[in-house]
Amino acid sequence: MSQYSSPPSVHGSPLRPHRGAMILVLGILGLVICFILGIIAWVMASGDLRQMDAGLMDPSGRGLTQAGKILGIVATVLNLIAFVFVTIPMILAIIAAIASGAGGTGP
């Protein structure tokens, strides 16, 4: 008997390995570093979960993949909210500066 087990298979062909750990890391980095990584984690997790449901990917990483997807969604939403709260005051400040400069005294 071999000490190594063969990968799970469907109809004789092996299942693709899961990428749960990588997706989880991308989701965490999306929260900490850059929201683009959160979007990548979200998209990758959605595709992998679809493949797991179809029986084409190893389902043992489903929990990691789901956690990475949730973190990716949270990272994206939080960063979009932060972007809105930063850009709207900046736009209003620029408009106020232009408006006060237009009404000033000329040379």
Image (cartoon, helix red, strand yellow):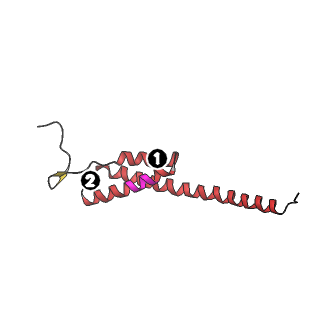
Q: For the residues labelled 2 and 1, say whether their Cβ atoms are less than 8 Å apart.
A: no
Q: CA distance from mark 2 to mark 1?
A: 23 Å
Q: Which residue is mark 2?
A: 57
Where does residue 19 sit, x and y in percent of width and height? 33, 48
Residue stretch rendered in magenta on the structure: 39-44
Type of amino acid at the residue the image marks with label 1: Ile
Magenta stretch: dominant SS? helix
Q: Looking at the image, which residue sits at the far left? A: 1
Q: Quadrant of residue 2?
A: top left
Badge number at residue 16: none
Please state, as top left, top right, bottom left or bottom right, where the C terminus lies in the image.
Answer: bottom right
The residue depicted at 52 percent of the width and 45 percent of the height is: 33
Q: Quadrant of residue 101?
A: bottom right
Residue 94 is covered by the magenta coloring:
no
Residue at image position (52%, 58%) is: 77
- Position of the N terminus by quadrant: top left
The three-letter code of the residue at mark 2 reads: Met
Residue 40: percent from the left, percent from the top? 43, 52
* Residue tagged 1: 28
